[in-house]
Image (cartoon, rainbow, N blue to C red):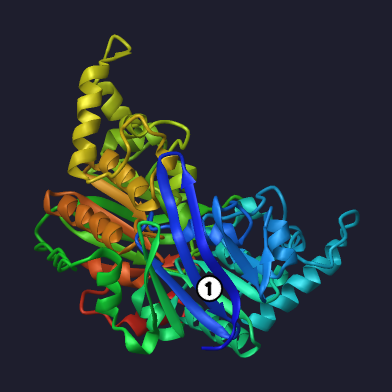
Amino acid sequence: MPTSLLSLRGVSKRFGAVQALSDVALDFAAGEIHAILGENGAGKSTLMHILDGVHRPDAGTIRLDGTPMTFTSPRAARRAGIGMVHQHFTLIEALTVAENLALSLPQTSRWRFDAAAAATEAQMLARRIGLELSAPDALVSGLPVGARQRLEILKALAGAGRVLILDEPTAVLTPQEAGQLFAMLRQLRADGRLVIFITHKLREVKEVADRVTVMRRGRVVATAMVDAISEREMAEQMVGDIVAARPRVAAHANGRPAAIEVSRLGARGDRGIDTLVEVSFSVRAGDIFGIAGVDGNGQRELFEVLVGLRRPAAGTVTVSGRPLTTFTPRAALAAGIGHIPPDRHRDGLVLPMTIEENLLLHRGILERFSRSGLLRSDAARRFAADLARRYAIQSAGLDAPVRALSGGNQQRVIVARELAERPAVLVTVNPTRGLDIAAARAVGDALIDAAEQGCAVILISTDLDEVLDLSTSVSVLSRGRLGAPLAPPIDAEQLGLLMAGAA
């Protein structure tokens, strides 16, 4: 093996009662792509945050080019040549694309900002690596999730020197965009840089990585050359014995009534531009309707209209035979529409509140356990404990803050809460984004269970595997228009091309 560029010995980190990392020893070489695998909560992100200067280790040493390093901040890590793309975005929403990028440029003055120069550099960098960049003067607060992810990648590349860390970077990219990203990573490898690549997608490990390290419960359990280990062996190292996936829900007979009908729906974005154009579809009770597409093609507006967060500019939405006349969250809930939002931290949970409080944070649940405006706390707690047990939410206790849970367990909290009210329609956006194999399968199984119990599930997703694995039929949303539904079996390559805008 080549001489190590980055070396870790005895690295440990504890958060309260949780031992996040225990005696981690790893070597990373210049000119390699090194994948890190592990369940949610295995310690991957904690380890990367130590390398990125977000956390300080309790014990252990980090050497870069043989020199002991102590990263006291992300700025210190960047000065040493380490850049990171975080799974949860670190962008400043009140600033523009160019301004966010400028914050990562090493030559940027602390006292003067040249907006035109930053915009030019942003466009040059985007063209060089082949990723589409939003307008440099666009505010980050108005960008869809996919555009924010691409900006995070550009930021890290702008500031990184020898080491680039990517945490689930392909979660909202099409196969074609992921292919462009991988080509860029291979170029970085050829230039002698080290790329550390955190992913839950075993296929991506086989496609782009040279070596893979598997972590479990804060420890390194295996490191191997990718050519010498199979996908199944990697999965077993991560989670133990592999349970067979649930079969996809079978499409129901055409005679079954539609639970939701959307007709000629139009919507405008925050800048007044039409982002949905005459979108029409219907979903029967018991079906899972997949809507695939690159983020930024109207998914956010469609989700917000269906759950009452945005008024449509045109068209109708009918639920269980009754047209929606008011587009508010209360009206959507009253009509029987539940939802799993695209960003669990920003839209799905109140992070400082407890797990129990988040499990109860639903109008229907609170009304069920309230009397004369007062919560029947004992009954509510028993209900929350039952949900936690049924959905296998692993925690130190219901009184722990929900922010202390792994991403997979946080998502289970949202799924448990929304399905507890047995909605007629469930609108979900990227429900398994950033989840490990076990957590993603648990969420997928919950959606299948809901469909089998008569729920109409609308699955809006940028993840082809997720759409193909779960949906009874699929349409592609591109440039605000919804294509004709496709029934399985569906060719993944063709679907990826449709997502990318091919006719």
Q: Tell me which residue sits at (49%, 78%) in the image.
A: 34
* Relative to 231, 249 lies left or right: left
Between 214 and 388, which is closer to the camera in this rendering?
214
x and y, in percent, of residue 370 in the image = 27, 17
Q: Is residue 366 above or below residue 323?
A: above
x and y, in percent, of residue 317 in the image = 33, 48
Tell me the SS state at disc 1: strand
Q: Quadrant of residue 238?
A: bottom left
Query: Most extreme residue toward the right, as rendered?
Result: 112
Q: Is residue 159 above or below residue 493?
A: above
Q: Tell me which residue sits at (60%, 69%) in the image.
A: 153
Image quarter hosting the C terminus: bottom left
x and y, in percent, of residue 44 in the image = 45, 61
Q: Is residue 18 above or below residue 96?
A: above
Residue 420 seen anywhere in this rendered image of the structure = no
Q: Quadrant of residue 289?
A: bottom left
Q: Which residue is mark 1?
A: 196
Q: Is residue 213 above or below residue 180?
A: above
Between 88 and 264, which is closer to the camera in this rendering?
88
Q: Quadrant of residue 60?
A: bottom right
x and y, in percent, of residue 239 in the image = 26, 64
- Identify residue type, mark 1: Ile
Residue 404 seen anywhere in this rendered image of the structure = yes
Between 472 and 257, which is closer to the camera in this rendering?
472
Total residue callouts:
1
Q: Tell me which residue sits at (27%, 18%) in the image.
A: 377
Which class describes the residues within 10 Å of circle 1: few (<14), some (14-19), or many (20+)?
many
